[in-house]
Image (cartoon, rainbow, N blue to C red):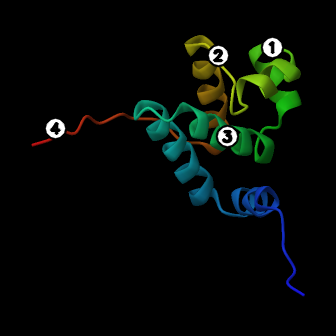
Amino acid sequence: MTVTRDVHETIQERIQSDPEFATALLDEAISLFLNGEPETARLVLRDLVNSTVGFEELAVTVNKPSKSLHRMLSARGNPTMDNLTKIFHVLQQKLNVNLEVHVITQT
């Protein structure tokens, strides 16, 4: 019999043990948003929040109920730009990174 494991549990452990992986996920979430894949981006952010700052601490920091944040970062969520900005800011602080956007011209 094959032993399986919840993918979210595996991701959480990797985020907590590998700061470079966590930073790469933040980068991926932003890229997904900018490239028209907001559903996947929200789910990646959800995993990052769960594994780093936690929804309760995030709620206090951004002054929003944790249930609202859970909804925002669900597959069908619809966070405002203000809320996304706050979430990105908190994750940047937690991961000790700065965000930069580079435009690449297509030929």
What amino acid is at disc 3?
Answer: Leu
Q: Is residue 99 left or right of residue 57?
A: left
Q: What crowding class fits label 2: few (fewer than 14 Cα within 10 Å), some (14-19), or many (20 or more)?
A: some
The label on residue 83 is 2
Q: CA distance from mark 1 to mark 3?
A: 19 Å
48 left or right of 32 in image? right
Horizontal arrangement in the rendering, residue 65 relative to residue 74 (left or right): right
Query: Disc 4 residue type?
Result: Thr
Residue 87 position, x and y percent, is 65, 26
Q: Which residue is mark 3?
A: 43
User: Comparing marks 1 and 4, which lies closer to the viewer?
Assistant: 4
Disc 4 residue crowd, few under 14, some 14–19, many 20+, Cα 10 Å: few
**CA gap, disc 2 and disc 3:** 15 Å
Residue 65: quadrant of the picture: top right
Q: Is residue 102 above or below residue 52?
A: above
Q: Which residue is mark 4?
A: 105
Image quarter (top left, top right, bottom left or bottom right) of the C terminus: top left
Query: Vertical placement of 84 versus 3: above or below?
Result: above
Q: Which residue is mark 1?
A: 64
